[in-house]
Amino acid sequence: MRRPATLVLVLVALLAPTLLLGQTSVDDALKGFDEDETDAAPADNPLNEVFKGFDDQPENPRSVDPAGRAVTGEPGWLTWGGSFAEELSYNYSHHVPSTGQSDHRGLSSVKTRLDLDADLHFDSGWKSRLTGHAFYDAAYTLKARADYPAGFLDGYESEVEVDEAFAEGPLATGFDVRVGRQIVVWGKADTLRVTDVLNPLDLRLPGRIDLDELRLPVTMSKLDHHRGPWTLS
C-alpha cells in the first residue's frame, strides 16, 4: 500500500533538477532586460563617441517667429530687407553694326544689382517706407567703353536710384493718406495693363514682361476711405 507514495517521491526527486535547470536557463535568457541603459553600455564603448550628442538638446536654440523668419534682434520700429542679383546676357544672333554704331554682339551684359528696402513704424499708426537700388554693368568695361556713346553709358552702365519714399497713416476715422514717391497698382494682370496706368514703365531693355520690375515710382498723394469691405481711393 506504500508503493504510490514511494513512486511520487521518486518522480519528485527525478524532476527537481530539471525544473531548477529550466529556471536557470530562463533567468539567463532574460538577463539584462531590466538593467538601465547606461549600465548596459560600457563606458569605453567606441560607439559612444560616434553617437555622442544626437540626443542632446541645443543649449541656445535659435528662435523663429511665426512667419518662418529667424529673429535677428532688430528693433520693432524697423523692418528692412533686400536682394542681390547677378545678370549675364549674351547676344548670339545680332546683325553686324553699321559704321559709327555700337557693337552689341557677343557679351552684352554682366550686371550686378543690389535692392534695399526699409520700413519705419511709429506708435501713432504711421509708417514711412524707403526703397532703392544700385547696379553696375561690367560688360562695357570688358569690351571697350570707347565704342559706346556717353549718353548710352549713362543709362546702361551704372545707376543709383531712390525708388519709393513715402509716409502713410490714418488721417481720420476711416481715412488713410499716403504722400510721397510711390507705386500704385490698380488691378493686376500678367503682361497686361488695363487700369494699372498710374506708373510709367522702364523700357530700356525690351522683352521684359514682369511688370513688378518695370514700374517706375511717381510723386503723388493717395487718399483711401474704408467702409466695411469697400475701399475708395
Image (cartoon, rainbow, N blue to C red):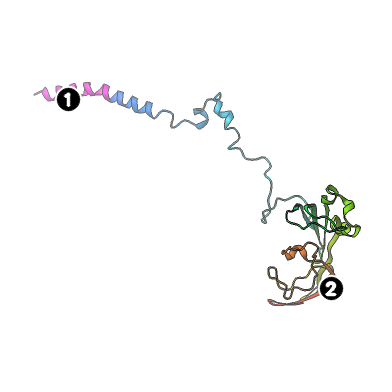
Q: Secondary structure at mark 1?
A: helix
Question: Is residue 136 shown in magenta?
Answer: no
Q: Is residue 15 magenta?
A: yes
Question: In the structure shown, which secondary structural element does the residue marked by tag 2 occupy?
Answer: strand
Residue holding disc 1: 8
Q: Which is nearer the eye, 228 or 2?
A: 228
What amino acid is found at the position of numbered circle 1 in the picture? Val
Residue 172 visible: no
Q: Quadrant of residue 127?
A: bottom right
Instruction: Return the residue at label 2.
Output: 221
Left/right placement of residue 213 relative to residue 179 reads left
Q: Earlier in the sequence, mark 2 or mark 1?
A: 1
Q: Quadrant of residue 154?
A: bottom right
Residue 224 in the image: x percent, y percent?
78, 75
Q: Taking 186 as reference, is 16 above or below it? A: above
Residue type highlighted by circle 2: Ser
Per the rendered image, the range of residues in magenta is 1-18
The quarter of the image holding the C terminus is bottom right
Q: What type of secondary structure mainly makes up the magenta span? A: helix
Vertical arrangement, residue 100 with respect to residue 5, above or below? below
